[in-house]
Image (cartoon, rainbow, N blue to C red):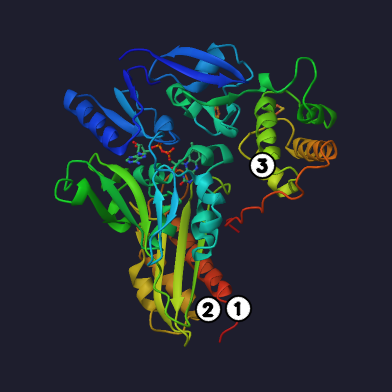
Amino acid sequence: MGELVIRATVNGAPRRWTVAPGDLLLDVLRREGYWGVKNGCETGECGACAVLLDGEPVNSCLVFAAQADGRRIETVEGVAAGDRLDPVQEAFLDHGGVQCGYCTPAMILVTRALLARTPRPTEDEVREALSGVFCRCTGFKKPVEAVLAAAARLADARPAAPPAGRKPARKAAAR
Amino acid sequence: MFDRLRAFHRPATVAAALRLATAERRAGGRGAFVAGGTDLVVQGDGSLRWVVDLSLLPLRYVRRRGAGGGWTIGSTTTMADLERSAALRRFADGVLCDAAATAGSPQIRNRGTIGGNLANASPACDLAPPLLALDASAVIAGGAAGARKAAGGRRTVALERFFRGPGRPALNGGLLVEIVIPAPPVPRGGRAAWAFQKLGRLQSDIAVVNAAAGVIVGSDCRCRWARIAIGAAGPTPLRARRAEALLVGRPFDRDAAQAAAARAAGETRPVSDVRATADYRREMSRVLVGRALDECLERMGRDPWASW
Ligand SMILES: Cc1cc2nc3c(=O)[nH]c(=O)nc-3n(C[C@H](O)[C@H](O)[C@H](O)COP(=O)(O)OP(=O)(O)OC[C@H]3O[C@@H](n4cnc5c(N)ncnc54)[C@H](O)[C@@H]3O)c2cc1C
Ligand code: FES
Ligand code: FES
């Protein structure tokens, strides 16, 4: 068995790719022009390569392309509607959450996944959600502010939304 | 990185996964099972020729075990599934949820599985201490040893015997199907508590040391049953049996907890590496076991600082 054909939905559009059995999703996405998916460490540490797989953030450097067959992938390219930025993107710009921008696509995506699950997150929940995306520039303060602002903006725009998020998972942190 | 990989199988059943692995092994060439890939891909073994992907197997579940109580957890259940499981949160003080919630970043927990965590057999894996403190067993299908003898080709191995050394699980090429947790033997009028502790450079890092404790006391407040498990402090995750024995039969209080923690540290066999020296690991084993037992005391409703 040499190459294999996989089918996935990327940002809502069906895609069909021929890949080698050992290809990783990060490399295939970049090869196919999704350059918002960044290559940082290739060891699962930095999160720059994060995409949403069936809505959940994963590091694409640790996923075999073959494992994405039949699944739904979202990259930052699918977030804005044409020239109209998503409220999460707007909030990152408004709150200075973007400097060099290398971590930004991943930050935007993990934020969208967080807000889909927990529309009104606490600051702790925001920090937890961003904890797997390393930012060398901002020190995280401004991205955290941006996510909280985006959550508030989205909640205002959607008054009928259910009130509370899920209960935060209790953590057994090293003291 | 995986340039020599020539086959990527995606079976839908355990039987098909075992058949494919057996056929590939006969044909020669190195290969592996893969679940979330968060250990396998990072290890980056470029000599792999084939992979059998487990992600389509129907093994992503957390189920109650019949009438007697206890739980069965399918091997491809992710760390995030465990972390968020409302049912497991209510079981054993949520000790499994707490441990799963510290295993790497959210993206890692969305991929990494309980089966991969155990099958990778790292002495530092975070699910081993709580599972050891719950007397868990591994159900294994196929593989070279013993498969034919056991009913339905499956065998059950107590988790303590599952870890044979760093990176050496007792799988013999078999597939880890599920983890079984028996109902804890809490007597009428008794109380039980569990706790997990981890020390890492960051909370989500691989543990320098991790530990879990479980204690059951009777209505007389004497300890009936105790489990103390420590990771990253020896070639495998280990149970501190002499420390457990020190607790059983005595009133469970802070003095007993501190004595047990000191003894548990003496049962570790740590090594020095990039993360910590052996001495530091031994000392932190004492500290973490002490904290876990204190937490058990607190959860039983006792002030850990008061003698009673
Ligand atoms: C950045 C980062 C941080 C991490 N932090 C932590 C941490 O804090 N704590 C921690 O414990 N771990 C941590 N890990 C390690 C890893 O995420 C976990 O061990 C995870 O649970 C592995 O599961 P997986 O499904 O990804 O395993 P895989 O990588 O798919 O497999 C691991 C090994 O197990 C074998 N295997 C998998 N499933 C089975 C099965 N059902 N039957 C037989 N063999 C099987 C594979 O062949 C392979 O050898 C981290 C990893 C990364 C990359
Ligand atoms: S490139 Fe994937 S986590 Fe860093
Ligand atoms: S903005 Fe530069 S890494 Fe985050």
For residue B199, above or below residue A99: below
The amino acid pointed to by label 3 is Arg
Task: Provide residue A85's location: percent of width, then percent of height.
Answer: 79, 22
Label drawn at residue B254 = 2
Looking at the image, do the residues carrying marks 1 and 3 touch, with CB atoms under 8 Å apart? no
For residue B93, above or below residue B306: above
Residue that badge 3 annotates: A117
Task: Provide residue A109's location: percent of width, then percent of height.
Answer: 66, 30
Toward the viewer: A133 or A15? Answer: A15
- The answer to whether residue A96 is left or right of residue B202 is right
Taking the spot 28% from the left edge, 28% from the top edge, the residue there is: B31
- Ranked by sequence position, the earlier of labels 2 and 1 is 2
Label drawn at residue B4 = none
> Element under label 3?
helix
Q: Residues within 10 Å of mark 2 (few under 14, many from 20)?
A: many
Is residue A41 visible in the rendered image? The answer is: no
Toward the viewer: B37 or B165? Answer: B37
Q: Residue at the far left: name it.
A: B149
| CA separation in Å, label 2 and label 3 | 41 Å
The amino acid pointed to by label 2 is Arg
Task: Provide residue B273's location: percent of width, then percent of height.
Answer: 42, 45
Task: Provide residue B261's location: percent of width, then percent of height.
Answer: 45, 70
Write down which quadrant ligand 3 falls in: top right
Instruction: Give the quarter of the figure containing the C terminus of chain A.
Output: bottom right
Instruction: Give the quarter of the figure containing the N terminus of chain A.
Output: top left
Is residue A81 visible in the rendered image? The answer is: yes
> Element under label 1?
loop
> Element under label 2?
helix
